[in-house]
Structures are given as structure tokens and as C-alpha cells.
Image (cartoon, rainbow, N blue to C red):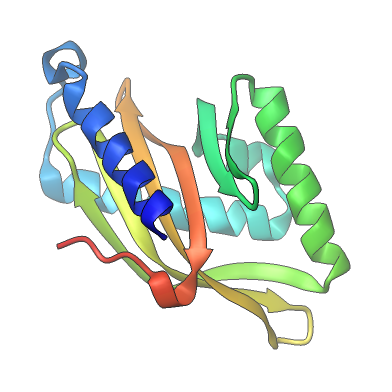
Amino acid sequence: MAKLIFTIRAAFAFLYLIPLAVHAQTTDPGTDKTAVTKVMHDYFEAYSRGDMAAMMKTINVPFTISGPKGFASYTTADDTLDMYTKFRDAAVKQGYVKTEWIDLEVKLLGATYAIATGTYVRYKTDGSELNRSGGTYLLNKVDGVWKIAVNVGYPVKDAFKPE
């Protein structure tokens, strides 16, 4: 857990070091928060349907994800798509049918970055729970479009809530 917290803090530090003036865009916090929330729902809905092309529209490349062996970064859309396809195929073999947010919170970090965090449930075809997890995502806004850049999953008991 300490490593996860350190990694999240390091990611935040990195985000604040990037000169925001370079990425300056006109922004409305209410509209951006709604847009980030929509991206997070679209991400799970496309993934649940197996519509990987639509899911990839929510992903920024390069992309970083946490896994059982630590963080992995993908520098091409094809590599990112391949990773997600393999992960989903393995879940489908366990009876996976969809993922839904139980709770989702969004905090804007200036005009071009956001953190989305919450708890989600993966369901089986019979409607029972496959598993429940916590997730924290860092998003960036480029050319007016919000995309997921970092995906950190962890046990639901450790779910992160922004202050």
C-alpha cells in the first residue's frame, strides 16, 4: 500500500511540474467534471460490450496501468489494445459480462488534468459478482478531449477518496 501511495503522489508531483501554460485551454469546471465522469462511464460500458475500438477512444497513449507485478507502460495503441483484449478475454472465461461503478468521484487538477476514483463491480453473466475493486485513474485533456492516461486498481478496502 505504501508503494501505491508513493506512486500516486509521484504521479501528482509529475503532473504539477508540467507547465500548465503550455496546455492552457478555456475550461468550465462543471462541464469538465461532467465530461470526465462521462469518459469513465463510457470506458466501462465499451469494455463491458467488448467494443475495444470504442474503449480505446477513452485511452491516452502512452498509457500506464498497475498490475500484479507493478506498473506497465504502453507506448502504442496496438500494445495497449492487446493488453486490454487479453485481460478481458481472461475475465470472460471466468463468466465476466460487465463492469459498473458503485461510486465515482472526480477532482479536477487544473484545466488539463483530473483524477477519477471509486469502487466498481465486475458482474458475471448470471448477475452475481465476479469481483469488486477500487480504481484511481489520472486523465488528461488534450485538444479539448479527456482521456485516461494512468489506471491503478487495488483492493476495494483501500479505495481512495479525494478530499
Which quadrant of the structure image shows residue 105?
bottom left
| Near-viewer residue (119 or 30) | 119
| Near-viewer residue (144 or 162) | 162
Q: Is 130 located above or below residue 38 in the figure?
A: below
Quadrant of the image containing the N terminus: bottom left
Residue 136: x %, y % from top left:
40, 54
Q: Is 74 located above or below residue 162 in the figure?
A: above
Specify whether 31 is left or right of 67.
left
Residue at left offset 71%, top offset 27%: 79
Residue at left offset 77%, top offset 44%: 85
Residue 95: x %, y % from top left:
82, 74
Residue at left offset 52%, top offset 70%: 133
Q: Is 101 located above or below residue 10 in the figure?
A: below
Which quadrant of the structure image shows residue 71?
top right
Residue at left offset 35%, top offset 59%: 117
Residue 32: x %, y % from top left:
22, 44
